[in-house]
Amino acid sequence: MAQLAVGVDIGGTGIKGAIVDVESGALTSDRIKKATPEGGKPDDIAEVVVEIINELGMTNDEPIGICFPAVVKDGRTMSAANVSKKWIGFPAEDLFEKRLGRQIHFVNDADAAGFAEQQFGAAKGVDGLVIMTTLGTGIGTALINDGVLIVNAELGHIEIDGVDYETKASYAAKERDDLSWKHWAKRLQKYYSHLEAYLSPELFVVGGGISKQHEEFLPLLDLQAKIIPATLRNNAGIIGAAKLAADSKE
Ligand code: BGC
């Protein structure tokens, strides 16, 4: 029988969850998606997460992994770039465990997505350093070296030209500044060239909803490393959170 786990991906606009076969990375249930409550405060988000997990209807104590857009240390959320500031220093894992009456595994969203891509997706089997980047409201990053996840890399926030560069190169910045693909690609070029200069990865994987349209911008980038679109798309966070939760129980 397949080994199953639940994955939940909390984002600024939506919270989604599904049951995952952690051997293949496939979803074995429908994906349930609900809007992130206005203001994104901890109790309100926890309520939606509980609803989703109940609707998924697991009964056998399967591992539960939850991912969130912040630095996560010892179950606490330590940053809040695009979410309510109430999360800074907040014991998030405790809150979810209390509300669910169950242990959970709690991780950064880009870490979950990057791990999923390395295990089951675009970076499967790639040795050396893989850098996952998710281009959305912010820029999420994950470092995976020889299959080992190095948690909490926050390379979306590297400073270039005196600014936190996720405010320039995220997909939200493209929308806000109404940039053409070409103009956005110029900012992305600057961003990825910096990452490359510091870390010399084997491979960049680009995720986030906009990666569906990778043909519009990835061919405009010139880097030493290969740069390819993520393949698990919007399910990467769910799959990675579930897989990390299952692995942590072994
Ligand atoms: C946060 C990261 C998160 C990323 C993607 C950034 O603003 O600092 O923790 O992974 O957004 O959601």
Image: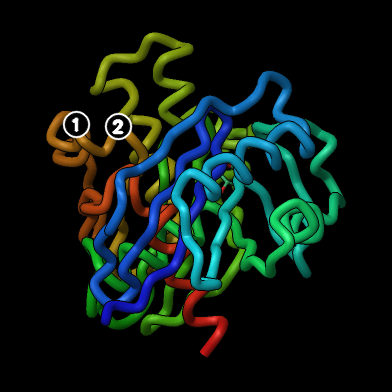
Q: Quadrant where the N terminus lies? A: bottom left
Q: Residues within 10 Å of mark 1 (few under 14, many from 20)?
A: few
Residue 57 seen in the figure: yes
Q: Any atom of ligand 1 within 8 Å of the CB at mark 2? A: no
Q: Which mark is residue 233?
A: none
x, y percentage for residue 43? 79, 37
User: Mark 1–mark 2 contact, CB under 8 Å?
Assistant: yes
- Residue 195, quarter of picture: bottom left
In this view of the protein, which residue sits in the foreground, 99 or 65? 99
Three-letter amino acid code of the residue under disc 2: Ile
- The residue positioned farthest toward the top in the image shown: 178
Relative to 135, is 27 on the left or the right? left
x, y percentage for residue 40? 70, 29
In this view of the protein, which residue sits in the foreground, 25 or 153? 25
Relative to 144, is 31 on the left or the right? left
Q: Which mark is residue 213?
A: 1
For label 1, the SS is helix
Task: Please name the residue shown 35% across and 62% down the image.
Answer: 20
* Above or below: residue 214 compared with residue 124: above
**How far apart, in angstroms, are the residues tagged by discs 1 and 2?**
6 Å
Three-letter amino acid code of the residue under disc 1: Gln
* Above or below: residue 101 compared with residue 38: below
Q: Which mark is residue 210?
A: 2
Instruction: Tell me the quadrant of ligand 1.
Output: top right
Task: Please name the residue shown 26% across and 52% down the image.
Answer: 232
For label 2, the SS is helix
Q: Any atom of ligand 1 within 8 Å of the CB at mark 1? A: no
In this view of the protein, which residue sits in the foreground, 138 or 92? 92
x, y percentage for residue 241? 49, 62
Task: Please name the residue shown 45% across and 11% down the image.
Answer: 177
Residue 198 seen in the figure: no
Q: Residues within 10 Å of mark 2 (few under 14, many from 20)?
A: some
